[in-house]
Image (cartoon, grey):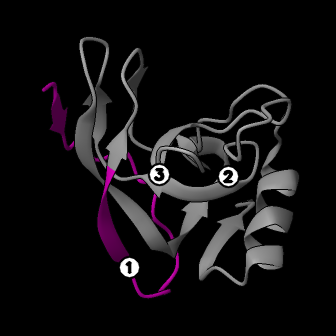
Amino acid sequence: MGEATFAPNDLLVSDVPVITRNVTIVSGQNLKRGAVLGNITTSDKYTLSASAAADGSQTPALVLATDCDASAGDVVAAAYASGAFDSTKLILGAGHTAATVEVAFRKAGAPLYVRVLK
């Protein structure tokens, strides 16, 4: 199994309560903290959410809390299930914007918020 590491980068903003949970990141990726994750419904594993995906991961669900190298195999890593994030620090998959991610979080009723800081 690969490894996950924490590297602070001012991703979290505001006073929204922060909750993390451990999820499995599917192999073949090297993701950084702040990556917006989608859930692959058939395996219940997570990957960088891309809007054109058709496996469930097209819907943003969580935000990766640690750097995660899953290039050699699946990795269990922490992901934010609640929090507010600086939109410029999020890592978005193809076809997503901060606005589309925020809309997906609102539709899901998730306590995840994307903030555009000025």
Left or right placement of residue 110 versus residue 69 in this view? right
User: The residue tagged with tag 1: helix, strand or loop?
Assistant: loop
Marked residue nearer the N-terminal end (3 or 2): 3
Marked residue nearer the N-terminal end (1 or 3): 1
Q: Residues within 10 Å of mark 1 (few under 14, many from 20)?
A: few
Amino acid at dot 3: Asp
Q: CA distance from mark 1 to mark 3?
A: 22 Å
Amino acid at dot 2: Ser
Contact between labelled residues 1 and 2, with CB atoms less than 8 Å apart: no
Q: CA distance from mark 3 to mark 2?
A: 26 Å
Amino acid at dot 1: Val
Q: Position of residue 66 (x, y in %)?
A: 29, 44
Q: Nearer the viewer, residue 53 or 116?
A: 53
Is residue 22 depicted above or below 46 in this figure?
Answer: below
Left or right placement of residue 9 versus residue 41 in this view? left
Q: Position of residue 30 (x, y in %)?
A: 37, 19
- For the point 29% across and 23% down, which residue is it? 70
Q: Nearer the viewer, residue 38 or 11?
A: 38
**What is the magenta segment's predominant secondary structure?**
loop
Q: Residues within 10 Å of mark 2 (few under 14, many from 20)?
A: many
Q: Which residues are magenta?
A: 1-23
Q: CA distance from mark 2 to mark 1?
A: 16 Å
User: The residue tagged with tag 3: helix, strand or loop?
Assistant: loop
Marked residue nearer the N-terminal end (2 or 1): 1
Find disc 2 in the rendering and name its residue: 87
Find disc 3 in the rendering and name its residue: 44
Contact between labelled residues 2 and 3, with CB atoms less than 8 Å apart: no
| Magenta-span inclusion, residue 16 | yes
